[in-house]
Amino acid sequence: MVYSCAYFKNGPQDSLDDAQLAKLDHICRKLDLRPDELFLDIGCGWGALAVRAAERYGAFATGCTLSLRQDLFTANLISERRLQHRVRILESDYAKLSGQFDKVASVGMFEHVGRRRLRRYFRKVFTLLRDDGLFLNHGIVRPEGATDGPETLFLQKKVFPGGELATLSTVIREAGRAGFEILDVENLRPHYALTCHRWVERLQQNVEECLRHVSREAYRTWLLYLAGSAISFESGATDVCQILMAKRRPTTLRRLTREYMYA
């Protein structure tokens, strides 16, 4: 139940499940997540990252989602794992959150914010992050010069109403205007091509189960969307980037190399 780019650490031979767990660990390592730190997952989806942060890294995790189904699913997951004292999920808009956190992640969410609201988005995250904290933004971006085409209309009408992709330069500029310093940028484009291929395979392998939950039109829409996305990432028409940031402060002690991310 992880709907974002997996991380094929050992290559294409990794299973999708292993690659998704590796992605969760990759994020937690980049954030240098430590026991008892307060961790926020903005747009937490089905709760996998928040649960992983608590179980494996000992964090106190908070997630927020606008989906009641995700909220209920994650509540059951937290209960099954007996993590009620470590993880809480809020059915809430990120803009309404309060408090401050040591580490913040946003994975596959800011594509829904819209280009015009990026500055507001980063300013809000800035207020939620402690002065010595770290923020990782993981999301799809478009290359410079890319324009909307028929496929954009299809996505906005059938798959992601209201969704918009910004360029990497726009994202970095708006983050900087909000007060963030960019520490690291990693493009995971080949990983998302592999992820989409695996999703297409799973949809095809489980067509009857899918049709018990959705219409044939919905099934075909998502099959077409994911197949097209695989081609888009393979061809370089779309990128997906993890951007690690911190508040620009003169006295903050930080890791001097990236070696800790790959230990």
Image (cartoon, rainbow, N blue to C red):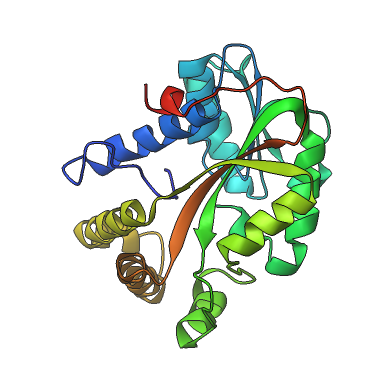
Q: Nearer the viewer, residue 147 or 89?
A: 147
Q: Is residue 142 left or right of residue 66?
A: left
Name the image quarter holding the N terminus. top left
**What residue appears at the point 73 percent right and 57 percent down from the top-left corner?**
174
Q: Hey, which residue is sitting farthest bottom in the picture? A: 150
Residue 182 is situated, as x and y percent measured from the top left of the image, at: 63, 43
Q: Is residue 147 left or right of residue 228?
A: right
Whether residue 112 appears in this view of the structure is no
Q: How many marks?
A: 0
Residue shown at the point (39%, 77%) measured from the top left: 217
Residue closest to the eye, 223 or 42: 42
Is 174 in front, or is 81?
174
Residue 263 in view in this figure: yes
- Residue 155 in the image: above or below residue 19: below
Task: Give the residue furthest to the left.
Answer: 13
Q: Eyeballing the image, is 199 above or below 53?
A: below
Q: Position of residue 119 (x, y in %)?
A: 77, 57
Residue under the point 78% across and 35% down: 128
Give coordinates of residue 63: x percent, y percent: 64, 35
Quarter containing the C terminus: top left
Tell which of 218 and 100 is nearer to you: 100
From the top left corner, tell me how far across and down residue 24 is, in percent: 44, 34
Displayed quadrant of residue 118: bottom right
Give me the residue at 78% from left, 44% from top.
179
The vertical placement of 218 against 183, above or below, is: below
